[in-house]
Every structure is written in structure tokens, then in C-alpha cells.
Amino acid sequence: MLSDHNSNAEDALLRPSFPLADKLRRLVWRAASIVLFRWTPVPLHRWRCALLRCFGAKIGASNFIYPNAKIWAPWLLSTEDVVTLGPGCEVYNPGGVYLGHHTIISQDAYLCGATHDYNSADFTYIKKPIRTEPYTWICARAIVLPGVTCGEGSVLGAGSVTSRNMEPWTVYAGNPAKALKARSKSISMR
């Protein structure tokens, strides 16, 4: 059934969200990641970090980035030292992602740095940064939504979803994630 809506070039949903140059840059990264990143053996963390640096990522020392981790735009990724991007995790970072030292992003976790304004006729694309402070742990299959800052030592439990900042040294779980209990600060003393 046809709609009464007049579909034409003025329709905001028919316009691209990203310029062609950005799409081409991501295409080159995607090709390089397929050929030089994804097939590499798990222990080759240094190789994958070097490749990400070639594409503009700011990667700290001793990072552990797994071969099937997905990074949308390496040039918008910054990590400090001793950061882990676990198997199958996804970093969708059009607004940028900053990961503090000793951050762990566990398997199949998703950092989602963009959304759309569903109240806008243009369905406006909104990108916001995601930031983790030192000693943050985003557990397996957890989701961090745009604009969230995960305080130092915070934990987002497995399968949880947060759209709000997480307080330091606090464990969160659920959908939406709620603070459950304090986490010991002694881990940062080691």
C-alpha cells in the first residue's frame, strides 16, 4: 500500500548521515581490518595495536585487543595503558571513545556512541562521546549508550544497559542499570 507521503530528495531520511570522505575512510579501514586484523592469532595484540595506530587511534602501552573486536572508526578511539577490548566487543564511536587505564571491555559488550532524535522529523543523527575512567569493567554483553561516563572503578554487570553516568567504585546491573553495591577500591592500590 502506498503512503500519502511525498517521497523526494527533500526527505531527510533519504540524505546520508555521513559525508562521502568519511564513508571512504571507513571502507579503507574495514578492508584493512578484514585483511590484516581479524584473522590474526589471539596473542598478536601488539600487531593489532600497531594497525589501529596506523589508522589514527591513540593506543596506550600493553593493550589487549582481540582479533574479532569491532572498532567503527579507529581515529576516534583513545586508550590509556593496559586496556582490554575482548572477543566480539563492538566500539561504535562516531562521537569518540576514551578508555582509561586498566579498563576492560568484555566479550560481546557494545559501546554505542550515537543515536537519533526520534522526535525530529529529520530523525537527526546524534553522536556523543563515551568515556571510561581507570579500572572500569564493562562485563559480557553489556551496553553503554551515547554520552555516558563510567566513573573510576565502576562495573556494568553482564547483559546490563546504561544510558546514564556510573558513579566511581560502584557495581551496576539490570536494564536499565541500577547501582547495586560498592566495589572495593583496593584494586587501584596494586
Image: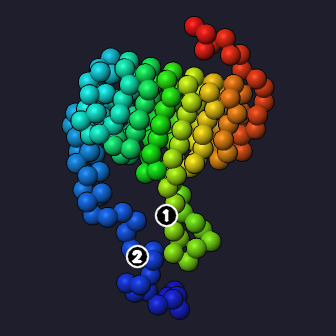
Which of the 4 image quarters holds residue 31? top left
- The type of residue carrying mark 1 is Tyr
Q: Name the residue at 22% across, 40% down.
A: 32
Which of the 4 image quarters holds residue 29? top left
Which of the 4 image quarters holds residue 158? top right
**Picture disc at residue 125:** 1
Do we see residue 165 in this rendering?
Answer: yes
How far apart are the two marked residues, 1 and 2, measured between alpha carbons? Answer: 13 Å
Q: Residues within 10 Å of mark 2 (few under 14, many from 20)?
A: few
SS for dot 1:
strand
Residue 128, given in percent of the width and then of the height, sits at 52, 52
Q: Name the residue at 71% across, 40% down.
A: 177
Q: Which residue occupies the foreground of this view, 3 or 100? A: 100
Please indicate whether residue 99 sits to the left or right of residue 189 in the image.
Answer: left
**Picture disc at residue 14:** 2
SS for dot 2:
helix
Q: Which residue occupies the foreground of this view, 83 or 45? A: 83
Q: Is residue 146 above or below residue 167?
A: below
